[in-house]
Image (tube, rainbow, N blue to C red):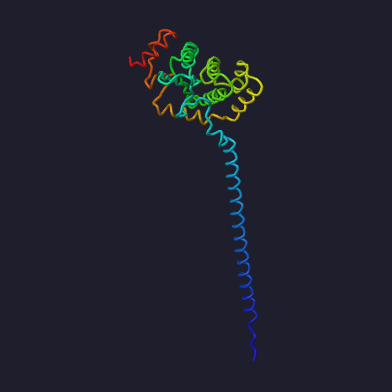
Amino acid sequence: MSTKKPAGSTSASNRRAQMRAEAEAAAQRARQRKILVTAVSVVVVAALIIAGVVWAQSRQQTPAASNAVPPNTTAAGDGIRVNPGVAEGKPVVELFFDYQCPGCGSLERSAGDVILGAAQKGDYQLVYRPMTFLDTNLRNDASERAANAAACYAEVGDYPKYHQLIFNNQPAKEGDGYTDTLLRDQLPAQLGTTGDKLTQFQTCYDQGKYKNFVDHTNTEAAKAGVTGTPTIRVNGKDMDLSGLAKPADFPAAVAKTAAGQ
């Protein structure tokens, strides 16, 4: 004998089944939204990471350039030897400078020829040790770009002459810095650099080939206790620049400092 459920009971059962189906459908839609949001987030994060890597790589040197050192770099990689042919045993004169330092510019313009001339005569070993701390103080990158430019010029021409020209063109106002046009185009033109050598120099400059080298020289100078520029050391001992009455006295002052007097 069959039994028949009341109509109201069947209707309630159908409603409950419909509500369960709707709840399950809603839960499924929620799970799908969660998966979609997660996937989109992963794509966005990945895109940001890739964009960051691409941007960072565009700012960095190539692996070869990052380790590059200019001709006549010291064994410690902390400077450039101006007269590498000088016999061992001669006093070692280290000139610490920042290309934006007004005092360095004054020293170079007043005594640079004497300092370089005595070095080229073989009176002492001369090492230029560029620093870039004024970039931080002045909120620019002119010191680093100038030092990189000078190192690049060491590949193709007279490094000390280019070094001198930078200081001869030092802005009258500290902080104005050096333009790329000056460092890249005008200074090599003043030195008569053309053709393949000019192309080599400008490529080196544009790539920032020696920026890591320059960063290293700055770091090593700070580690050596140099707190201001210009600083001149003779065999590791600071030279008293205040005692120089005239530029011509420089070679004698070097000899005196080397002798510990």
**Occupied quadrant, residue 198:** top right
Nearer the observer, 261 or 14: 261
Q: Is residue 121 above or below residue 212?
A: above
Nearer the observer, 88 or 111: 88
Residue 42 seen in the figure: yes
Tally of numbered tags: 0
**Occupied quadrant, residue 58:** top right
Measured as percent of width and height from the top left, residue 214 is found at: 50, 28
Q: Residue furthest left?
A: 261
Q: Residue furthest right?
A: 195
Residue at x 42%, y 12% (from the top left corner) = 251
Q: Residue furthest front?
A: 87
Residue 218 seen in the figure: no
Considering the image in quadrants, where does the N terminus appear? Answer: bottom right
Measured as percent of width and height from the top left, residue 24 is found at: 61, 67
Measured as percent of width and height from the top left, residue 185 is found at: 63, 21
Nearer the observer, 236 or 23: 236
Q: Is residue 92 above or below residue 250?
A: below
Measured as percent of width and height from the top left, residue 167 is found at: 52, 16
Considering the image in quadrants, where does the C terminus appear? Answer: top left
Residue at x 40%, y 27% (from the top left corner) = 224
